[in-house]
Amino acid sequence: MAHLLSPRRSDHELTLRATTPAEPTARPGSQAPGPRLGWVLAALVGGLVCLVTGWVLVAGLSVLGWLAGDPGSLSATLEVATRLWLAAHGTGIRLAGIPLTLVPWGATAVAAFLLARCAAFAARAARPGQRPRPAGIAAVLVAAYLLPVLVVGARLGQLGAAPGHLAVVALVLVAAALHGAARALDVRPTRRWPAWARPVPRAVLGAQLVLLGSGLAVLVTGLLVHLDRVLQLQDRLDPGVSGTIALVAGQLALLPNACVWAASYALGAGFTLGNASVVSPTLTDVGALPGLPLLGALPTQGPGPSGALWWLAAGVLAGAVAAWVVVRARPQARFDETALVGGLSGLLGALVFVGLAWATSGDLGTLRLAGMGPLLLPLLVMALSTLGLAGTGTGLLLGLWTRYRRTRTSAGAAVPESSAASSAAAAEAESTAVLTR
């Protein structure tokens, strides 16, 4: 048979032809990419765009509420909207002379999402030759965002009313920008960590998701059980269409706070809605409250039902999840090591959740509505004990199970060797007998 490239091949229909590649044709409506802005300019512009977008959202919802209420001044409504927008950044404010330090973390989450997207855009806008880092992008972006907030807060808010909340909000915004920039640049900081520490963030995050999910379940259950009360509060307000939109948006802004407080309820510590009030699985004692429909989900006054104690399983599950994530990354560890790291992961998840509970606390006024949020000292005790013990027990069980599986595997590998040895001995004996004969 002739070679494939031989000129004496009998098949003359098959030929090889070399051609130059054709120029790519542009699709209809497509344009050539223009020059990039550079990551510094993109971060500066992105921070200002996020700033204006967040304020416009809050101002628009406030205008809807103003249209549904008594006629008043639009400028006064926009000033109230600006104060509420400042509250989402941890700045203490005063509304009608009433101090307010409670952070609506739903609105803060929107700002963090916008900053993460703008950080990714700034990372992709780097010019050839520029080597941006996530830390640099986050620093420029958050600085462009927060500096106007601080200036306006010094004018209309009270920066010193809750400095801890302001610092936590700034930390969350920086973390969101770092995450967005790192994903766009394909940078993973945990790659430089020791192997044993890499699963720790995932374990803590898993515990928080379990606790927040349990809090959401508690909240939804309360809304369904007391739906008639919620509807009555809604009817009493009679906000109209535009007012209903603003009311729902305001309650969604407080939804993360409500989930954390409900998770504290599930852990058994409970929360307070002002001085001398408590809401827990064993007792509910509250006084006069604002007519917010979301508050209709509160349990009935008096001792709690025995079925409410089943919510305590949420803390056990959170500690177990944290331990499972950490132990899964250590398949060769002994059972005493897995019990130790499982317990430590549960304790770390509990401490982070207590920090979340503190960050969602605050004041909605004075006297009755001061100091709202989870009961921090009981929560610290309940979270550490529940998640720590659950993590230790889960780590111990997983370590013992891994040891049992290794023992069975080694025993199974030893059986064929012994069988082969016995077979060889039998064959040798049989050959000896034949030679003897």
Image (tube, helix red, strand yellow):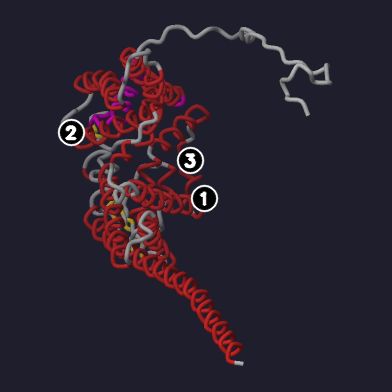
Mark 2 secondary-structure assignment: loop
Q: Is residue 83 above or below residue 12?
A: below
Magenta range: 68-95
Q: Quadrant of residue 359?
A: top left
Residue holding disc 2: 161
Q: Position of residue 154 (x, y in %)?
A: 19, 22
Residue at image coords 33%, 67%: 335
Q: Position of residue 12 (x, y in %)?
A: 83, 16
Between 156 and 386, the residue placed more toward the observer is: 386
Residue holding disc 1: 228
Q: Is residue 375 above or below residue 183?
A: below
Query: Please, what is the three-letter code of the amino acid marked with disc 3?
Result: Gln
Q: Can residue 266 be seen in the rendering of this structure?
A: no
Quadrant that contains the C terminus: bottom right
Residue holding disc 3: 234
Query: Please, what is the three-letter code of the amino acid marked with disc 2?
Result: Ala
Q: Residue furthest bottom?
A: 437
Q: CA distance from mark 2 to mark 3?
A: 32 Å
Q: Contact (CB < 8 A) between labels 1 and 3?
A: no
- 162 sits left or right of 286 in the view: left
Q: CA distance from mark 1 to mark 3?
A: 10 Å
Between 325 and 349, the residue placed more toward the observer is: 325
